[in-house]
Image (cartoon, grey):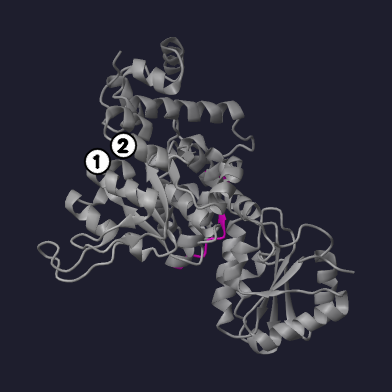
Amino acid sequence: MTFARRILLVGTDHRFSQMVQTHLHKTFLLTAPVIRAEDIPGVVTRETDGVLLFLAADPQDADRIETTIRELRLQSTPAKLAVLESEDFATGRRLEHIVQHLDGRFLWPAQLRDLNSWARKAITPGVGFVDPSTESVSERLRRRLLAHTPSLAHMIDQLDIAASHDVTVLIEGETGTGKTHLARLIHECSARAPHRFLVLACGTLSGNLIASEFFGHVKGAFTGADSNKVGKFAAAGQGTILLDEIDTLGLEHQANLLRVIETGEYEPVGGNETQVCQARIIAATNWNLLEAVDRGTFRRDLYYRLHVITFHLPPLRARPQDVGPLVRGMIARYGTRFGKKIYAVHPDAMRALEEFAWPGNIRQLENVIQQSVLTCTGDSLTLSHLPPMIHTRADGRPVEAATGVPSSLAQNRETTERAVIIRALEKVGFSRTRAAQVLGVSRVTLYKKMKKYGLLSKPNGLAPGTLDYVANRLKD
């Protein structure tokens, strides 16, 4: 009987791991690979229902095992989780408090019969764990997207092309939608993964420092240049460099960048020696670059050089299915950082997070989760731990406790649609005519929808920044 990667051993003690491997092979003719706890994210998928058997041999394993099991439970993975403890480890009763979160717990070698009986039932045919050595780029992309941002799964084919070929990539999307994450994903799934991934925030640099940050400078190039400096294009080596907020670059710096993309050549500030950039360039912007080209603030030739493969990331309010996976991953990360023992998210809290409009996108969500984890005192994050602003839905109504009947698709669609209209109005200075053009609908259609969502009334006493404040700002 054989089962393809249906059980993995998680441990660091070589002798203990080898004994367990030998036993499983003799008993079940099963080859169980041994991995480290940090390797688990690379082998688990949403479909995997195999067994992760944690081997506890050293007292130092306790914290590592507890943290990993907590994070896996938060992610709601279907994999079964069990612990096999050596006699020396078990005497300390170090994992008693997490027994309720385990599918099995056994003592080696005293409970081998129990382990065998449990394993025989647990490792029946099903979906095994991923083998990273044989996983294709598209499979790796699919696994990572489904784990964190399932709404972007339709991009897999394009991402596969971007990761497999050394071409420039342009990523568009509002601030905080995950452009850096997507660029890093392309890098990590490419042949350049072993090399550096650098981010250069162009919008934070003053005009006279951009060339130095890009290309470096030689000693004496300008006042304060007391030594040679290596620029980002050289520091990235054969890795990837992300130029964030590329729309903020002036025309002069755009010309220098165009030369690098076309020829790979540049000179450090104050230097005469031509150097060659070996890094791959990915650009990101919060705005529509084609509009900037039409305004004359962005070079058309540079735009076409960047526009080889383009990705547009929708705002989080248009991707409610991504909120759950993102929330669970953030709670796991911050729970570990702050030493919190959170194993679950209450349905009411998750519902409130999914229904919020998130004007600040993923960056705002992360800030909220960080605050909530800090205030959480139990093993489950509840509605009471969320900031007050999350308790109010996008339509202005408070979030109520779950009644057992989930929100309808129509309600979710209306909540998202209302938030999108508000965002479009804010972007164009509350002009209904321009908002209709941005949304691709007629003014009549926009008017009807605004009336439906209560955006035409002009309530008094609302503070700037609240959602209904738009009603006081509307223009024809």
Determine the residue located farthest toward the right in the rendered image. 1
Instruction: State the quadrant of the C terminus.
Output: top left
| Mark seen at residue 299 | 2
Q: SS at mark 2?
A: loop
Image point (62%, 35%), residue name: 406
446 versus 377 height, above or below = above
Residue 194 in picture, x, y percent from top left: 50, 67
Q: Please state which of residues 358 and 150 is positioned toward the viewer in this rendering.
A: 150
Report the magenta residues as a range: 339-348
Instruction: State the quadrant of the N terminus.
Output: bottom right
Q: Please state which of residues 397 and 231 is positioned toward the viewer in this rendering.
A: 231
| Mark seen at residue 251 | 1
467 versus 101 height, above or below = above
| Mark seen at residue 32 | none
Query: What type is the residue that disc 1 sits on?
Result: Leu
Q: Is residue 173 visible from the viewing direction of this image? A: no
Query: What type is the residue that disc 2 sits on?
Result: Arg
Image point (59%, 49%), residue name: 160
Label 2, residues with CA under 10 Å away: few <14, some 14-19, many ≥20:
many
Question: Mark 1 or mark 2, which has the lower sequence index?
Answer: 1
Q: Are marks 1 and 2 in contact (CB under 8 Å)?
A: yes
